[in-house]
Amino acid sequence: MMPLPMVTRSAGGPLTAFVFIRFEGCMLKISGAAKTYGGQPIFSQFCLTVGQGRFNVLVGPSGCGKSTLFDGLTQVISLDRGDISWKGISLPHLGNHAAYMQQKDLLLPWFSLLDNALLPAKVGKSPIPEMTLTAKFLFKRMGLAGYENYLPHEVSGGMRQRCALVRTLMFNRDLILLDEPLSALDAITRRRLQSLLLLLQTEFNKTILMITHDIEEALLLADEVYLLSPSPMEITQRFVLDQKKPRKFTDPGLMAIKEQVLIQLEGKEL
Amino acid sequence: MTSSDYLSLALVVVILGVWEGATRLMDIPVFILPPPSVILVTAVTRASLILPHAAITLLEIVLGILLALCTAVPLATLMFAKPALEKALAPFLVASQAVPVFALAPLLVVWLGYGIASKVFMAWIIIFFPITVSLLSGLKNCDPAYRVLFRLMGASFYDTFIRLYWPWALPQFFSGLRVGVSVATIGAVIGEWVGAQQGLGFLMIQSNARLQVDLVFAVILWLSVMGLGMWTLVGLLEKRVVKWKPI
């Protein structure tokens, strides 16, 4: 895979205005990852890099092995081979460095939204009063103010997913893995939450690796889009998007890329 | 009331009506089969005799339930935490239920005496099993995606247990408890049949021997009221505790 260009980019607040990408140009580096299920290679020799503060998106047909890759990164399964390095340090998995958000909100139905958001703090023995303030601030930022004491089944799917987003931030980790976080939502709610996902990068300086089926979502959010092909999963094409965010669909540059992506995907199906 | 409530009410009325009519038309003596009206009158007029015995039986059952909770909850937790232990213990658990309580009753009276200890023990044997089994299966059917979430947070087993597994298993724990309390009367009453000086089982044996069949039925009526009451109580408790919608 070709190396990422050295770029400096604004990642939000004044203190982080210029973040140089160190560690051979990447925060997260996966190389030579391999996993076989029942003699069938899901991926063998999979490589990927994500730069500091970047928002990289994997797009590919369902069943191509994206979620298996995430499972490997988060130690749900163990990879057969492969090297994962984070900030230049080689690790067996990213369990202690990544927050993970999925299509299912995974809120605990017996806790209020606020208690759900505070779960990482409580489990991690962080000081609760401070973390409560942080959580309340994030509730406001995500448009959940006033719903702190509701139980998950009392609010809509979109609000539950916002709460899951707050909880993901409350992990207080630099890397965020998103596995189709919005695919269970209706189109209108999804558009609203996409702008909140963008905050992860622009306001909270997170490094993000996301899986999605939604090409438009990828084009709106991503710095880099990787198209994947199945069995074994491989990156077939990489698009670097340097359009300013927040973006609009009507941006001619994006439309052109979308066309290319669609041609690529349809070509694969034929 | 829903339509199913009306249906069960109608069923009760029909059964009692047939019973009442048949005993009166066929002129069956009260010491063979008393009509429901006589049973009801006996249950009320002899309440001063029955209730003190009922209190003893209730005490035995409640102690049995408490004992069962104190053993079933830790055991289910241990078996959940250590699957090897579950494998090792499962055959013994099943065997303990395969042996009929009736067979153990006389032995227990020999070992534990005529007092309430033998009855509490009988009730415990019966209640213990459904609580352990349902709690264990409740703990085990926790969605693995949640476990991953807790592991990513770096949660210990204890943290995960109190915040995830235990609340997750609560609805199933309560259904086990409900089964437990409704069958608990069996254990206590059989214990009293075999050897006791008080309790509803003792009263039944006594009145049966004296051909006071109406009193036997009155005792059975009170027993069912007790069982139903405890069932309802557990239901209310569950409603208070489990306020969320299970996933």
Image: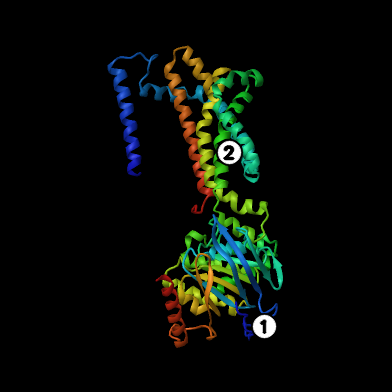
| Residue at horizontal 55 percent and vertical 62 percent from the top | A68
The residues bearing labels 2 and 1 have C-alpha atoms spaced at a distance of 55 Å
The vertical placement of B83 against A113, above or below, is above
At label 1, the amino acid type is Thr
- Identify which residue, A119 or A190, lies in the foreground: A190
Image x and y of residue A61, in percent: 46, 68
Callout 2: few (<14), some (14-19), or many (20+) C-alpha neighbours within 10 Å? many
Q: Quadrant of the N terminus of chain A?
A: bottom right
| Residue at horizontal 68 percent and vertical 71 percent from the top | A86
Q: Which residue is mark 2?
A: B132
Query: Does residue A28 appear anywhere in the picture?
Result: yes
Callout 1: few (<14), some (14-19), or many (20+) C-alpha neighbours within 10 Å? few
Judged left or right of residue B157, residue A183 is left
When asked about the image quadrant of residue B102, the answer is top right
The vertical placement of A41 against B59, above or below, is below
Marks 2/1 in contact by CB < 8 Å: the verdict is no
List the single residue furthest toward the right.
Answer: A89
Question: How many labels sit on residues?
Answer: 2
Q: Which residue is mark 1?
A: A16
Q: Chain of mark 1?
A: A
